[in-house]
Every structure is written in structure tokens, then in C-alpha cells.
Image (tube, rainbow, N blue to C red):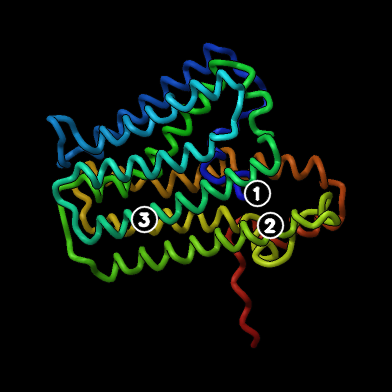
Amino acid sequence: MHSMGVGTQMTEVPSKTPSALQNVGWIIGCLCIAALMAAAGSDRGQTYAGLPLFALCGAVCFAIQWLAFVPAWVSRTERYFDLTGGFSFLSATAVAVGLSSQVDIRSWLVVLLIGVWALRLSSFLFLRIREAGFDRRFVNLKRSYSRFLMTWTLQGLWVYLTLAPALVVLTGKNHASLDLLTLGGVMLWCVGFFVEVIADRQKSEFNAQPENREMFIRSGLWSLSRHPNYLGEILLWLGIGIISIPILESWQWAALISPIFVYVQLTKVSGIPLLEGRERKKWGDDPEYQNYIARTPALWPRLPRLSK
């Protein structure tokens, strides 16, 4: 993601290889969580052909992963994994807006924001993997059928939960005019998006220099936060959640798990812990790295102190 791939950080699992039964358990767990979200998000929502539209979008998220898994397993390749993730966001959004009978300005605003984000991130990650030739996250994952399938299923859950507030906007029956809260959500999304883009660009340019091959980045936004790309990701999805608030009702409020899910995933589960674990193995004894860790926040930049 950026440094290792944002959304796809969910696919990084502990180094201890789980059994096939455990992998199946993970898959079933993902589907159960998705079913609960489908039930909550479909409450008071639109239907298509008698089926809840919000739930149909969830089915699209998983169907795309499983369809892409087949050639990926046959070829033992992860080359199109990130691209499939971005395509899933775009496809679920397109299905929602295409089958909705009540599309308004808020809906088109959400479509625009999701489209810009998904196209930018998925293309960035795809080009990065194409240049590298492989994705080290998948060296062991793609050796096991059940573990590789679990990885694609996890990505389906990541897409569905993260996209939940946007899908409620697109598939719900409630509508509201644009207000200051919506404007605040859009502004927060813009801040997060540009922080993410700038952080990615700075790290790509840093890594492109041969002399930096064995170095860690600590300039630009990376001097203010050890993971500014993750910060941007969290902020932009929080912005999407805020945009959805004026139209949420009843169980649809469960969709606001999206920014919480993104935050916990990146800071507690797989993002920062796994990435910094690798960094400590590589630079843990380096005094400069130790100093960087000590003075630079993991995520939120410190506010400058006002001089007396």
C-alpha cells in the first residue's frame, strides 16, 4: 500500500501459516459479517427485482473477487489483486447508482469521490507491482488454495464494509439537501485524498533513487507522520461517512462502521503493526531509525507549540 498497499493491508495475515480449516473459518466469518452489514444497510432501502439493492452490491463485491480468484489461482499470480479491489469499488458503486430509482446530487457527489479515489489508488498499486514483478505479500499466500481464496474473500469484505456509507447514500430512500455537514465531509475527503497522493508520490520518488535502496524515508510528510498515507486514507473515508450522515436512519447507522473499520485495520490489525515489524527487523539497531521512531508520531502529526 502505498508503502504496502492501503486497502489490501487487510490481506496481510500473521506469519504463522493457518490450516485449511482455519482458512475456511475465516471465509465463513467474512460472509457472516457481510450478511450482518447487508441486513443493516438494507433497512429502509431500495429494492431491485424484489431484492435489497444494498445487499446486491455486497454480492457484487464478493462475486468479483471469486471470479478473479480463478485465473489468479491457475496462474499463481497476484498481479491483478489490487486492480481487482479498485474495480470492485467501481463496480459496486456503478450497480448501486445504475439500479437506484432515486439518484440525487448527494449520490452523484459520492460516485465522483469514490471513482476518483478507486481509479487513482488501484492504478498506482498495479503499476507499482508491474514494475516490481511480484508482490511480496503473496509469496506464501498463493501456495495454498484455501489461504489464497481467503485472501480474496477478505478483500471482498474490505470493499463492502469500507464502501457501506456510500452504498447507503446510493441505495437508501431517504434524501436531504446538501448542507454544511456535507460540505465538511467533502473538505475532509479532499484533505485526506491529497495527503495520501502526496505521501505516495514522495515515497515513490524516494524509493526510485538507487542511493535510498537501504534507507527509510523521513522527509516531506514522512517527517511529520510515519504513515501519512494511512492518515490520508482514514481521513477520506471519514469524510465519506460524514457525507452520509444526513440521510442515515434506523439500522443504516451501522454503515458508519466504515471509518472505524479502516482506522482499526490500518493502526491495530495489519497496517502499521506489520509494516513497522518489518522495518524494525531491517533498521531496528540503527540509531537514526530509533530517533525517527521516537520523535515522529505513527499517524497523527503533532500540533506545533505556540511560543510564549
Residue wearing tag 1:
3
The amino acid type, in three-letter code, at marker 1 is Ser
The amino acid type, in three-letter code, at marker 2 is Lys
The circle drawn on residue 203 is 2
Quadrant housing the C terminus: bottom right
Residue wearing tag 3:
240
Residue at image x 59%, y 31%?
A: 78
Q: Position of residue 256 (x, y in %)?
A: 34, 48
Q: Which quadrant of the view contains residue 219?
A: bottom right
The amino acid type, in three-letter code, at marker 3 is Ile
Front of the two marks 3 and 2:
2
- Relative height, residue 123 to residue 140 (above, below): below
- Relative height, residue 132 to residue 293 (above, below): above
Q: Position of residue 240 (x, y in %)?
A: 36, 55
Q: Secondary structure at mark 1?
A: loop
Q: Are marks 1 and 2 in contact (CB under 8 Å)?
A: yes
Local packing at callout 2 (Cα closer than 10 Å; few below 14, some 14-19, many 20+) is many
Residue at image x 42%, y 65%?
A: 188
